[in-house]
Image (tube, rainbow, N blue to C red):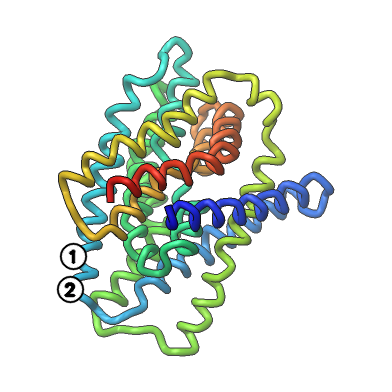
Amino acid sequence: MELASKVATQVIVMFLLIAVGYICDKVGLVTKRGIKQMTDIVLLIVSPAVIIQSYNQEFDPNLAKNLGIAFVYATIAHAGMIVFSRFLFSKKNPGKYNIDRVCSIYTNSGFMGIPLILSVLGEEGVFYGSAFLALFNITLWTQGVAAIKGRQKEKAKPAAIAKQLLLNPGVIGILIGFLIFFTPISLPDPVGQAVGHIANLNTPLAMIVIGTYIARSNILQALKEIRIYYTSLIRLVVFPLLMIPIYLLLPSDSLVYLTNFIAMACPAAAATSMLAAKYGGDAIYASKIIAISTVLSVLTIPLMVIVIGFVL
């Protein structure tokens, strides 16, 4: 219960920051261009800095073993969600079916998961959470893009997807982190301090950006669509609960469980709306799911942590 209380407190703090972003957009303090620029700062600079900072330590065999287990959990989680999502949604509207699947599979592990993990579990939590983020990026740019495009004749080119994947800031941050952790290389102290200061921007800046996204979505209309609540329920409750048997079958350090579980319990990824717009999907419907699942997560994330607390 102590962990659940800590998570609940942090979620409330994060939603207050989201409210700041919402208000900033509504009163005209930020423009569409400004939102894009803030998003780029978070994606290209701040998020990789958080990951690099968590890897900036001497090699430890136990940490390496737990990181390997975290990758196993993340792989099973994404594979399971990809399979189960095929059977959980109505196919009467193919466009919405594709978005339902993608929004239920891919969590906001970068913008919301990593800040929450950092605040509650510290840098070691981010270290293990990077495994989930890596699998998120790999599967989003492969299966996710394919699902959004559906049966369109023009398929995404493998070379273009590979380029997007290799140039993904999260993946680059993890690769740099691997280089630091698994080799004698370490960041000079001034560089390490600078990276740390940049990493500290992650929670406030990412939450403010999420708030601006919610402000620009038609949340009042979204509140009237029952299908969105169903998709959000799958994302926020059903899929996290499906992972609990895996944790019991593959026992590990409780911190490894928690980082994976918190990442699993996050709302739909903001990237799903961006990819839907890029690859001909229903971006408006995706933005509604993102908004509603984000609002609901203030209740569901602490609830899910209470549930996992009984298991650990």
Q: In the figure, residue 79 lies in which quadrant?
A: top left
Q: CA distance from mark 1 to mark 2?
A: 6 Å
Q: Position of residue 208 (x, y in %)?
A: 66, 54
| Looking at the image, residue 51 lies above or below residue 149 | below
In the drawing, does residue 66 fall left or right of residue 304? Answer: left
In this rendered view, identify the residue nearer to me: 71 or 252.
Answer: 252
* Callout 1 crowding tier (Cα within 10 Å): few <14, some 14–19, many ≥20: few
Q: Secondary structure at mark 2?
A: helix
Residue at 56%, 55% (x, y): give it: 9
Q: Secondary structure at mark 1?
A: helix
Image disc number at residue 264:
none
Q: Position of residue 53 (x, y in %)?
A: 42, 74
Q: Position of residue 257 (x, y in %)?
A: 29, 53
Image disc number at residue 61:
2
Q: Residue furthest front?
A: 1
In the drawing, does residue 265 fall left or right of residue 12? Answer: left
Residue type for callout 2? Pro
Residue type for callout 1? Lys
In this rendered view, identify the residue nearer to me: 118 or 251.
Answer: 251
Residue under numbered circle 1:
65
Q: Position of residue 179 (x, y in %)?
A: 29, 74
- Determine whether label 1 and label 2 are within 8 Å by CB: yes
In the drawing, does residue 275 fall left or right of residue 105? Answer: right
Q: In the figure, residue 85 lies in which quadrant?
A: top left
* Callout 2 crowding tier (Cα within 10 Å): few <14, some 14–19, many ≥20: few
Q: How many marks?
A: 2
In the drawing, does residue 251 fall left or right of residue 39? Answer: left
Residue at 40%, 49% (x, y): give it: 263
